[in-house]
Image (cartoon, rainbow, N blue to C red):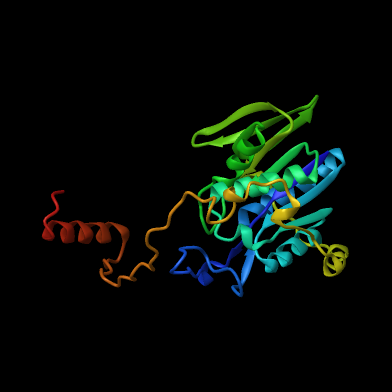
Amino acid sequence: MNIIVCIKQVPETTEVRINPETGTLIREGVPSIINPFDMYAIEEGLRLRERFGGKVTVLTMGPPQAKEALRECISLGVDDAVLLSDLAFAGSDTLATSYSLSRAIMKLGGFDLIICGKQASDGDTAQVGPGIAECLNIPFVAFIKKIERIENGTVRVHRMMEYGYDVIELQLPALLTVVKEINEPRLPSLKGKIRARKYEPIALKACDMNVKKERLGLTGSPTQVIKVFTPEIRREGEMIAGDNPDEIARNLKSKLKEAGFAL
């Protein structure tokens, strides 16, 4: 079974910086990690390989420093890693990113299943997974909490819903985005760490793929950032005191009445 896992290297939460001119994230030189949701996608890919055999390839798009994220994936046990890194991809929004990743997947050849984390922690759009599926014209289901079975060219999954889950069966090849409830990611092995130190990811540039240049980077990104700013930290407010929850509730009710709120 040929499994492709798409990941993203994201800035650590406290280290997010924005380019005021382009409205895009500054990634170069910023401490980064693998998007937390993507760790569950990697783990699920490895578990499927253990059940059905085959190969797990991790794919990402980003600056050269994203190699470190790919080496971390190698240390976890994935077979190969591919990096899309080219100035032509700079400033891509979710649409341009989906297109670029889909062209890279086509370049890599046949696949049975693509797995992504449900969303990235820096953008929180949850759009790239569905976008890749649309570009490749394959079935797609989001928010997968369990892959029940794979047989006869189909995959049956449980899609997490607000009150329970849906059971869905779809034809392969397909794309799934997974939630953290699906598994518990493993830690790197010593053997994996040794392999990762020497591993050099497969590098792809725009010229290596069959792409339309007008669909790449800022040119291919219809999303326009009008303004970027850091929200002001407000220190207003007061602590409602009391010796127990009932007294705190009474004091809060009194304060609200004084402020003119009808209760």
- Residue under the image location 38 percent in, 58 percent down: 226
Residue furthest top in the image: 152
106 versus 32 height, above or below: above
**Front residue of 146 and 16:** 16
140 versus 210 height, above or below: above
Name the side, left or right, on which 198 lies relative to 255.
Answer: right
- Residue under the image location 13 percent in, 56 percent down: 257
Q: Is residue 44 visible?
A: no
- Give coordinates of residue 190: x percent, y percent: 85, 66
- Give coordinates of residue 249: x percent, y percent: 25, 57
Give the quarter of the image for residue 156. Answer: top right
**Front residue of 260 and 149:** 149
**Front residue of 183 and 211:** 211
153 versus 121 height, above or below: above
Name the side, left or right, on which 67 lies relative to 18.
Answer: right
- Residue under the image location 86 percent in, 69 percent down: 198
